[in-house]
Amino acid sequence: QVTRWLKSIIRPALQREAAVRFLQLQFTMAAAQVEAFKGAKQKFMDELRGLAEAALRDGTEMRKASAPKKTAAQIGNTLKNKVDDLRGKALEQFFFAALPLAAHNCKGPGILVGGNPRIGELDGLFIDGSGPVSIQILSVKVGEKDRNKNKSVGHLGAMLEALAEDVSAVLHVGGQPDDALTQTLREHRDHIVGAINAKEIQVLALTPWLNDLGRLGPGLQVDDAVNKQLKDFFDAGAVYRLAGEELSAFTENDERFKDFDFVAHCTNANTPRSPRS
């Protein structure tokens, strides 16, 4: 009876303590995610004005004096693609700062061969070396749709081929050489290529609208309130409006832009471009 009585006291106390620790952890994670969102938002705003100015300059100051200036639509296309890329990079920055991806053996953000995006580029790579090496690709998306997964796998294949052809090539992660990752992929190249050919490589999408990481374990979700801020700020229409305002600051007296609506132009684009997939 004494034992049962003690258990009746201790068990609820332990449950309350566990609940308090869980809430404290959730609060800490949410606070870190708020700061990560502020950083990603600031990165986007800091670079946006320069993109608008550069797009206009490149479409106006032609290399050949005889070349005609680009139209508003052509300049708009250039700016749209740059804005889409910047949105993707800002979201990458957020997710890698807000979620414990490194603790889940995820390399990133931005994996390139020798820093050259023409060969191929991955947002992130999960590597499990506890047994036969297991690879999962992280693909940060800017929209609500989950697409271009085959493209991500193709990038991985191209990068493996480049490493095989050039023994001096080194993978760069976040702009810095990563010898350990390079060696791992070289050593297990045949196994990974076999998995690619067998269509066994998973691509996990990560976006404010879609998160495939829940299957990897707890702690890889964004707080609901923070995620709502992500959706509101990085919504396509919202970022195009911000970019349009920046472009207007430079084109007030430019006749090419007299009747040009940048947001409508982006909305009506036939093939909206996503950043790296």
Image (tube, rainbow, N blue to C red):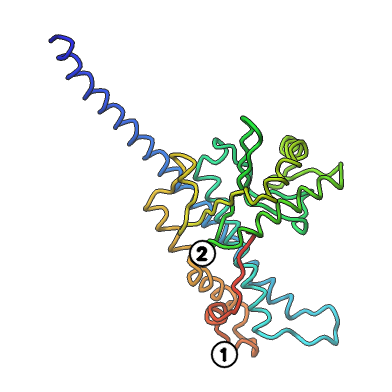
User: The disc labelled 1 sits on which kind of residue?
Assistant: Asp
Outermost residue to the front: 198
What label does residue 259 carry, if any?
A: 1
User: The disc labelled 2 sits on which kind of residue?
Assistant: Lys
Q: Nearer the viewer, residue 1 or 9?
A: 1
Q: CA distance from mark 2 to mark 1?
A: 32 Å
In the rendered image, the quadrant that contains the C terminus is: bottom right
Taking the spot 64% from the left edge, 86% from the top edge, the residue there is 254
Please say if the residues under marks 2 and 1 sit with CB atoms less than 8 Å apart.
Answer: no
* Circle nearer the N terminus (2, 1): 2
Q: Is residue 127 left or right of residue 17?
A: right
What label does residue 19 carry, if any?
A: none
| Residue position marked by numbered label 2 in the rendering | 145
Q: Where residue 242 sits: x, y (%)?
A: 52, 70
The kind of secondary structure element at disc 1 is loop
Q: Is residue 276 left or right of residue 115?
A: left
Q: Is residue 232 left or right of residue 64?
A: left
Mark 2 vs mark 1: give the one in front.
Answer: 2
Displayed quadrant of residue 190: top right
Q: Where residue 70 sits: x, y (%)?
A: 73, 84
Question: Could you classify mark 1 by the number of other residues whose Cα lies within 10 Å: few (under 14), some (14-19), or many (20 or more)?
Answer: few
Q: Where residue 169 sits: x, y (%)?
A: 83, 44
**Is residue 31 shown above or below 140?**
above
